[in-house]
Image (cartoon, helix red, strand yellow):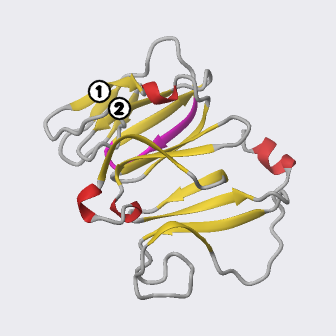
Amino acid sequence: MYQIAQLDNPYSILQPRGTKVAHLALGANHILMVTTSKEVFAAGRNLEGQLGLGFSSKKVDISAAKQLETFIHQGAKKCYAAENYSVVITMGAKSKVWVFGDIPFLQSSSHLNKQLTPKEMNWGEVDKIACGSTHMLLLVKGSDNLYTIMSVGNGLYGKLGDSNPTGKNHYTPISVDLPYCEIKYTKETKDSEK
């Protein structure tokens, strides 16, 4: 059992019976779980569709974790949660990234803000993600087996790392301008994270 503590009303989240959690992500008011059998479950407040259940609700909190059907045969690897959206990475020949919830920074039109079911993004082989409220950073593996840090979303105050503090949105990932440095990210590093 997990507990989401909100200032006005803490409540418990029930983990599905017979499951073991391999990866866990907490948003402001919701939780995502990837199980050892590579399934994805979500629970909590679903105000913006961040649970990926196909609907949003201002009145109902989901306290018993619900399985996301999109990922039943996808082989989920990792999950991430921000305040109003969620991200799942699935395995396969190449990893896939799926997003859902209130993600206006990924939409070119403001009336398309809510993605109520998981949407696959064509972002290459993403290994890790850091979620901000209006942007994301991605660690993307290239064909040369080297990793690049990419950013996507709202660039206000230069938070996308593209040397442009004017706030231009990027709806597809861009490379982050970094001074030259060598980052050792090896198989041993990955194994130690398990």
Which part of the image, by quadrant, shows the N terminus?
top left
Q: Which mark is residue 116?
A: none
Specify the farthest residue to the top.
Answer: 18
Q: Is residue 51 above or below residue 108?
A: above
Residue that carries the numbered disc 1 in the rendered image: 63
Cα separation between marks 2 and 1? 6 Å
Residue 151 spot, x, y in % from top left: 56, 68
Please report the bounds of the magenta region as a residue range: 22-29
Dot 2 surroundings within 10 Å: few (below 14), some, or many (20 or more)?
A: many
Front residue of 42/72: it is 72
Count of numbered tags: 2
Q: Amino acid at mark 1?
A: Ser
- At horizontal 69% and vertical 80% (from top left) the residue drawn is 178
Which part of the image, by quadrant, shows the C terminus?
top right
Instruction: Classify mark 2: helix, strand or loop.
Output: strand
Residue 158 spot, x, y in % from top left: 48, 83
- At horizontal 33% and vertical 32% (from top left) the residue drawn is 53
Q: Amino acid at mark 2?
A: Ala
- At horizontal 66% and vertical 59% (from top left) the residue drawn is 139
Residue that carries the numbered disc 2 in the rendered image: 43
Whether label 2 touches label 1, CB < 8 Å = yes
Queried whether the magenta region covers residue 75, the answer comes back as: no
Task: Report whether 185 appears left or right of 132.
Answer: right
Instruction: Classify mark 1: helix, strand or loop.
Output: strand
Residue 174 spot, x, y in % from top left: 59, 71
Task: Report whether 105 appears left or right of 59.
Answer: right
